Amino acid sequence: MNKIKKKMGKKFVVGKTPTIKTFIIACIVLFLIDVLLMGFLIASIDAMISIDAIKLLNIALVVFYIFLFLIYGPSVMICSEHWDVTDTHLEYYSINGHFRQLVYAFNVLFGREDMFSSKVELNSIKEIKLFWKEGILGVVGATTFAYKYYEVYFAITLVDDSIVIFQSLLANDNNNKEFVDTLDYLKNNYNIIINDSYGLKEAIGNPDIDLYEYITEVKKKLNNDEGGVI
C-alpha cells in the first residue's frame, strides 16, 4: 500500500484503488463465464453442428462477451472504492450511473482515474462529522430474507458552511487503521474538528469491536433509529 500511495502522490488511501490487474481479472472471469455458458449451449444441441453454425456460435461468443463486459465490467471496477488525502486535498469518488461507471472503468485502464475525483481543499475544512446510515439487503420471492447493515459517512463542513457528504468506511477495506490514522492526521495537522459523538472512530479502530453490534447498542441507548443521522 505504501508503494501505491507514493506512486499516486497520496499521504493516505482509505479503501482499495482499482488497478489494471483488477480490470484484467474482471475480463478473464467474464470470458470464462461466457465460454462456459456457450459450452452448455453447444452441448445441449443434439444434431451435428455444421461449419457455418460453428462460425455463428463463435460470433455469438464474442458478442455475448462484449454484452457481459458492458453490463458487469463497470460493477467489478466500482467494487474498488477509496478516498484519499494528499498534501493539499481530500479526494473522494462518487461514480453514479452505469454509463459513467463504464467510462470510469476504461479511464482507470489508461491511468486517468483522477478525472473522476471530487477534491476538497484541506484548509477549507472546518469540521468532519461521523455518522451512520442503515441499509437493508434482501430478496423477496420463494424465500424471503433481509440483512441489515450500517454504512459510516462523513459530513464535512467547510469554512463557507457548505456541507459535503460521502461514504467514508468502505466495505472493501480491511485496513481500519488507515481510516483512524487519516482522521488523526487531519485533526493534528489542520486543526479540523472531528465530531464523533458516538465513538465511531474508536470502535472502527478496535479490532475486538464488531461495528454492527456497536452501533446497534448505541441505537438502543438512544432509544431511536436516527441517532447517527444528520
Image (cartoon, rainbow, N blue to C red):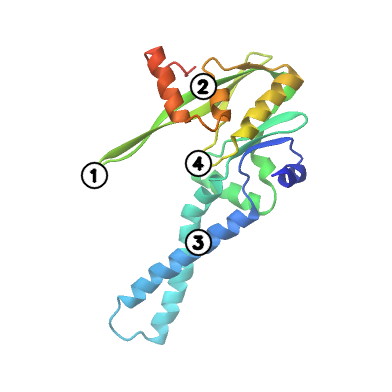
Please tell me which of labels 3 and 1 falls first in the chain: 3
Q: Does residue 40 lie above or below 19 as drawn?
A: below
Circles 2 and 3: CB atoms closer than 8 Å: no
Q: Which residue is mark 2?
A: 131
C-alpha distance separating marks 4 and 1? 30 Å
Q: Quadrant of residue 34?
A: bottom left
Please tell me which of labels 3 and 4 falls first in the chain: 3
* Residue 167 visible within the image: no
Q: Which residue is mark 3?
A: 29
Q: Could you tell whether 203 is left or right of 142 in the image?
A: right
Image location of residue 31, percent across then percent down? 49, 65
Q: Which residue is mark 4?
A: 97
C-alpha distance separating marks 2 and 3? 36 Å
In this rendering, the count of numbered labels is 4
* Residue 78 visible within the image: yes
Give the amino acid type for the residue marked by disc 1 in the picture.
Thr
